[in-house]
Amino acid sequence: MVDRRRCQDGEYVFVEVDGQLVERLPSAWTSLGCVDPVVTIAAGRSLFRADDLARLAEIVAAVACAERAPRDGGGKKHA
C-alpha cells in the first residue's frame, strides 16, 4: 500500500502494482475499510456487494483492453 485517502466519492487505498504503476481501490474492498452492513447481513453468504463486483468487472475489462492495445503508438500493424 502506498497511500490511503478520502476522495470526493469515498475512501481509497493506493497500491503499487508491478513496481511501477499505482492503482486506486476502494478501501471497502480491503481489510482497511469498514465492514459493510450488506456484507454483515449476508452472514458469510456473500463477501461482496453487486455494485462492487460490477465496478471490479469494469476495471478488469479496462486492464485487459490496455494489455491488448498495440504498443507502437500508431495503432497500425506493420507488414
Image (cartoon, grey):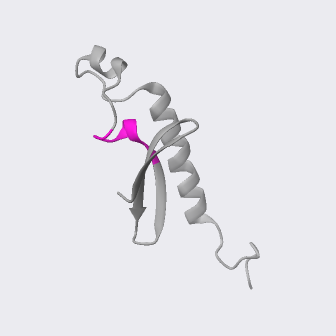
Q: Quadrant of the N terminus?
A: bottom left
In the rendered view, tell whether residue 55 sits above or below residue 69. above
> In the image as oriented, which residue stretches furthest toward the left?
44
Question: Where's residue 8, x and y in %?
Answer: 58, 37
The reply, left or right, for residue 22 in relation to residue 8 is: left
Q: Quadrant of the C terminus?
A: bottom right
Question: Where's residue 49, x and y in %?
Answer: 41, 26
On the image, which quarter does residue 50 sit in? top left
Q: How many marks?
A: 0
| Residue at horizontal 23 percent and vertical 17 percent from the top | 43
On the image, which quarter does residue 74 sit in? bottom right
> In the image as oriented, which residue stretches furthest toward the bottom?
79
| Residue at horizontal 54 percent and vertical 56 percent from the top | 63
> In the image as oriented, which residue stretches furthest toward the front?
6
| Residue at horizontal 59 percent and vertical 61 percent from the top | 66
- The part of the chain drawn in magenta is 25-32
- From the viewer's side, name the closer residue of 73 and 22: 22
On the image, which quarter does residue 19 sit in? bottom left
In the rendered view, tell whether residue 54 sits above or below residue 23. above
> In the image as oriented, which residue stretches furthest toward the top?
41
| Residue at horizontal 64 percent and vertical 75 percent from the top | 71
User: Per the image, is 71 magenta?
Assistant: no
- From the viewer's side, name the closer residue of 5 and 53: 5
- From the viewer's side, name the closer residue of 53 and 29: 29
The reply, left or right, for residue 16 in relation to residue 75 is: left
Question: Where's residue 20, x and y in %?
Answer: 46, 72
The reply, left or right, for residue 9 in relation to residue 36 is: right
Question: Where's residue 7, x and y in %?
Answer: 54, 41
